[in-house]
Image (tube, rainbow, N blue to C red):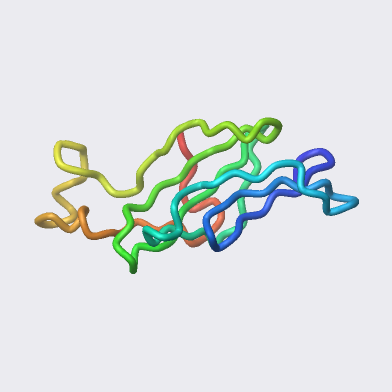
Amino acid sequence: MLGDRLFKVNIQSTLVALEAKSGKVVWETTIDDYKKGYSNTAAPLVVKDMVVVGTAGAEWGIRGYIDAYDAATASAAGVSTTVPTAGEPGIETWGGNAFKTGGGSTWITGTTIPS
């Protein structure tokens, strides 16, 4: 919660802001395309005026990430991936091309916080 708003994710990879007292939808935004295997299952985390969410779906081949959304406007801050790709630090820990086939879901609220 933040102020009079409650934030929740849906398994279809959307983030919703609700009026806490009435349950009325203030805004809803798509986090990613659930048809590509992305889903959201962990409660969002409010940090200052941002709502932090993580992705699930590595079992479907997605590359995990976290993102933050402005609590008032739903605008996204920008993705921070949880799995390095070729040329990024840490790629050597993933072996071969494993980063291309998925991994790095964030199943627990607060698992990773973007910098």
Image quarter (top left, top right, bottom left or bottom right) of the C terminus: top left
How many numbered circles does the render carry?
0
Residue 104 horizontal/vertical position (percent): 35, 56
| Left or right of 76 in this view: 20 | right
Q: Is residue 85 left or right of residue 50?
A: left
Residue 10 appears at what percent x and percent y?
60, 59
Instruction: Residue at 15% x, 36% y: name it.
Output: 87
Residue 6 at what x, y percent from top left?
76, 49
Identify the residue at the far bottom of this view.
59
The picture places residue 73, in percent across and down from the top left corner, at 66, 31
User: At 53% from the left edge and 34% from the top edge, which residue is drawn?
Assistant: 76
Q: Nearer the viewer, residue 93 or 12?
A: 12
Furthest-right residue in this view: 21
Quadrant in the picture for residue 80: top left
In the image, is residue 36 above or below residue 113?
below
35 with respect to 50 (left or right):
left
Q: Where is residue 2, by image quadrant? A: top right
At x 44% / y 53%, what residue is drawn?
A: 33
Nearest the camera: 38 or 4? 38
Q: Residue at x 21, y 39 (%)?
A: 89
- Residue 100 or residue 105, whichever sits in front: 100
Considering every residue shown, the one lying at the far left of the view is: 96
